[in-house]
Amino acid sequence: MTTSNEINDLLDALSKVLLRCALFGFLLLLLWSGLCTLAGDLVYGLHGRLFDLTRHELSLIHYSGMAFTKICVLIFFLFPYIAIRLVLHKRW
């Protein structure tokens, strides 16, 4: 049978993993938006001609992808992290 300390240690380790995943997800979003903003011509040159997309279509695809990624990071990493930290805080 597991003890309360073991469960707390497990939840603490899980919360650290979730926080790192959330940080990496937001770092990916920052890099992605930076590339689209600062190197938009390069991104369009690589993907626009390859898939025969207009600049507007490519921007829509990128911004939709960024929104989807942000929602996934929030739902799957940040919200569980906050929930676990609240549970651990209540256990003290």
Image (tube, grey):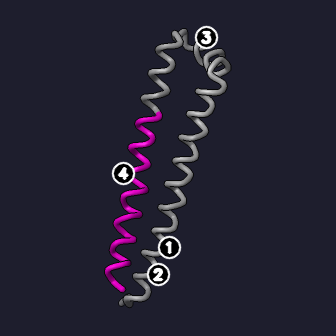
Mark 4 residue crowding within 10 angstroms, few (<14) / some (14–19) / many (20+): few
Q: Callout 4, which amino acid?
A: Ile
Distance from the alpha carbon under mark 3 to that under mark 1: 45 Å
Q: Which residue is mark 2?
A: 9
Q: Are marks 4 and 3 in contact (CB under 8 Å)?
A: no
Q: Which residue is mark 1?
A: 13
Which residue appears at 61% of the width and 10% of the height? 49
| Element carrying mark 3 | helix
Q: Callout 3, which amino acid?
A: Arg
Lower sequence index among marks 2 and 3: 2
Quadrant in the picture for the N terminus? bottom left
Return the x and y of residue 82 as percentages of the image width and height: 38, 64
Q: Are marks 4 and 1 in contact (CB under 8 Å)?
A: no
Q: Which residue is mark 3?
A: 49
Q: Is residue 86 left or right of residue 53?
A: left
Return the x and y of residue 8 as percentages of the image width and height: 42, 82
